[in-house]
Image: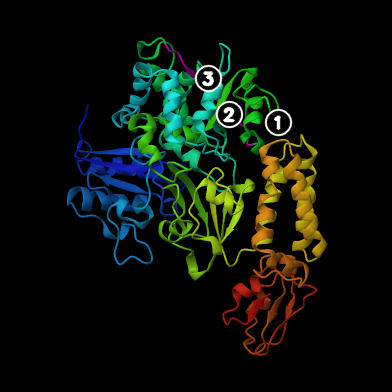
Amino acid sequence: MDFYRAHILVCTGTGCSATGSAGLIDEFNKQLQAAGLDKEVRVVKTGCLGLCNVGPNVVVYPEGVYYCHVSPENVKEIVEEHLLKGRPVAHLLYSDDESTGKATNLTETPFYQDQVRIALRNCGIINPEDIDEYIAYDGYAALAKVLTEMTPQDVIDEIKASGLKGRGGAGFPTGMKWQFAANSPGPVKYACCNADEGDPGAFMDRSVLEGDPHSVLEAMTIAGYAIGATQGYIYVRAEYPIAVERLQHALKQSHEYGFLGENIFGTGFSFDIGIRLGSGAFVCGEETALMVSIEGKRGEPRNRPPYPAVKGLFGKPTILNNVETYANVCWIINHGAEAYAKLGTEGSAGTKVFALGGKINNTGLVEIPMGTPLRQIIEKIGGGVPNGKKFKAVQTGGPSGACIPASQIDVPIDYQNLTAIGAMMGSGGMIVLDEDDCMVDIAKFFLQFTVDESCGKCSPCRIGTKRMYEILEKITSGQGTLEDLDTLEQLAAHIKANALCGLGQTAPNPVLSTLRNFRDEYEAHVVEKRCPAGKCRAMLQYTIDPEKCKGCSACSRVCPVEAISGVVRSPFQIDQSKCIKCGSCMEKCKFGAISKG
């Protein structure tokens, strides 16, 4: 084993890879060799560090100095100043708008201070392509303990006692699901992993697979032992090339080390895992549709019961958990169910990973104990809403979720509290909205996604969501009526009661939550024929204030349809019959003379 006095960890998750982190690795190796440090300092590719908006991210150990927005041009300076002279490069350190100084260490940032990383424990810490690094962080210790010290029922009891619930959206108790499958008779059973993450703005599972793939493989093997399965499948989106590549590499290494395959640890237990690629169908995130897709058929849900734990993949008892659920399992085995149950709240144990995005300063991955107030996530961890705008709402749970208004910003985030306010945890997408967002338009966006992604098998989802979308189109174009609001609610109730699968049943949620919490915006659209947020283009009207207009003609020169006319040094006018409401004039005006409403 080679020893180094320092390690440079470079994030190679999708976000940082997209901003050029691969080039950083090459440049660091080049500069280290030029400085004669290539035998003393090692460059390590790692998974997502969490703070995606300031990438590419680099951490230098043993000090743990955190650099952000690193470019290849900065590498030589880091090598010469930090690694040769021992002086951190100040202008590359992280800082937020309200801090009085800069955070030298990643854990000193407000983004990290309130987080507890269990599912993400190894992401940004180890090289996901090196099984030895995973083993150094207790990797495969849980599997060894399970196979040599515990019975299958012991394992199930431990997961039950931990209070772990499925992190894929439904929140069903994991241990209970495993118990049902274990109790189902038959020599052939399957343990499957749902990595078909399809919610807009969600990237939690992808980041775990990219940063810590062995944690999922180890947990699936434990699950297989617990229920009596010898084969597992990971159903992963083909649009996640980095995750797929690292999963394939991890599978190869696990087989080479004897952690997968025949007679694991010499205990007589055998288990293997295969990868199946999804083609981007959102409905294949639903468990029965996913299993049908693995079987090579068109991905459509089927009626339940029978549930997968009784009759699932290939008609055999099957468990299906998502990536984040599995990522908690090894920690629970290694640290004990009691330690996990102490985190979070009485009915929602442990932590939850959220993909924080939208109108927020710190976008990225967040893992917090259940029960953490939403305000703490938005204002401290997320750094608040940028550009001085007011926080308006947060959309949780994607197309199946709901909008939580600013009036409920102090709600503790757990399964029970979110259900009580008409929202849901979902898989973990958290999209922040500000005062410039139109809630009717937001509902239309998510409903359009559902319409496009409906598998079409059942008419309530296929036809009902389309009718709801058409009504929202009517409302946002200024043609809506108050009766349309009643029709929306009636259609929503019918779809929720009659759609075949959970995706169809929850499709109306964004509409219902916005109707409930922002009905005044809907009424403004249908009664006053205006969009309060100024988002719905068909309802906009750009006007020029003659008192502020200087007659510079800049607006008329940029108008693509010649809708603005006037005489230089005199107020200009906009012909509303020609205006296409592109907003170019308002952007060009230096005097604030043009407004929209």
Name the residue: 30% across, 58% down: 103
Name the residue: 45% across, 13% down: 270
Helix, strand or loop for disc 1: loop
CA separation in Å, label 2 and label 3: 27 Å
Type of the residue with mark 3? Ala
CA separation in Å, label 1 and label 3: 26 Å
**Between discs 2 and 3, the one toward the N terminus:** 3
Q: Write down the residue under mark 3.
A: 182
Q: For residue 249, say whether it is visible.
A: no
Q: Write down the quadrant of residue 108 in the picture.
A: bottom left
Q: Write down the residue under mark 2.
A: 277
Along the line of sight, which residue is nearer the eye, 429 or 592? 429
Residue 323 relative to residue 102: left or right: right
**Between discs 1 and 3, the one toward the N terminus:** 3
Q: Write down the quadrant of residue 124 in the picture.
A: top left
**Between discs 1 and 2, the one toward the N terminus:** 2
